[in-house]
Amino acid sequence: METRIPNPAMANPATLKALIALAESTGDTGVPKTTHYLMHVRASQINGCSGCLEMHTKELRKAGESDERIFTVAAWRDTAYFTDAERAALALAEALTRIADRADPVDDEVWGEAARHYDEKQLSSLVLSIAAINTWNRLNVATRQVAGA
């Protein structure tokens, strides 16, 4: 696989700055960084973004996460490695990533479970974080950014 063009955000400094600012704006809300990384891995798995998968799994490892947790993000429903709060965040990430799959992409059950674990500011952080990773995924997939290249 060959990269079509460099990542468009890298070619446009204003866009890169804005996307970095968006990502940074999701911190300092009490949501653990590892929760954001887990959501980023899950969205990147769904979207087939190898570059983001490589980056965010490395972030998880650097943060001290176990191989078991990293390797089973795609099967988070069927493992004992994730907390209820992390499961709620992962469900939200899946729903917001797969918005075309259902008439009500983020149904009341998914939202309610997330709201049970996170306050309004934290929910905002999660939604913005998911939107940011989906933006990066789409830029990378469209232009065939290749992990390890």
Image (spheres, grey):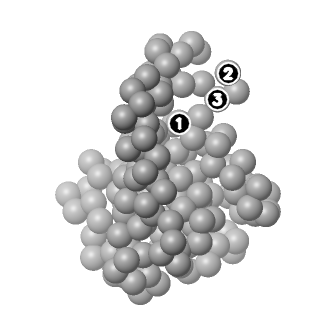
Q: Residue at x 33, y 75 (%)?
A: 111
Q: Tag 3: Cα neighbours inside 10 Å, few (<14), some, or many (≥20)? A: few
Q: Amino acid at mark 2?
A: Ala
Mark 2, residue position: 149
Q: Amino acid at mark 3?
A: Ala
Asked whether disc 3 touches disc 1, contact meaning CB atoms under 8 Å apart, the reply is: no
Q: Residue at x 39, y 27 (%)?
A: 12
Q: Residue at x 43, y 51 (%)?
A: 21
Mark 1, residue position: 49
Q: Residue at x 43, y 36 (%)?
A: 16
Mark 3, residue position: 147
> In the figure, 5 relative to 80: above or below?
above
In x, y percent, where is residue 5?
A: 46, 15
- Considering depth in this image, is 8 or 65 the residue closer to the camera? 8
Residue 117 appears in view: yes
Asked whether disc 3 touches disc 2, contact meaning CB atoms under 8 Å apart, the reply is: yes
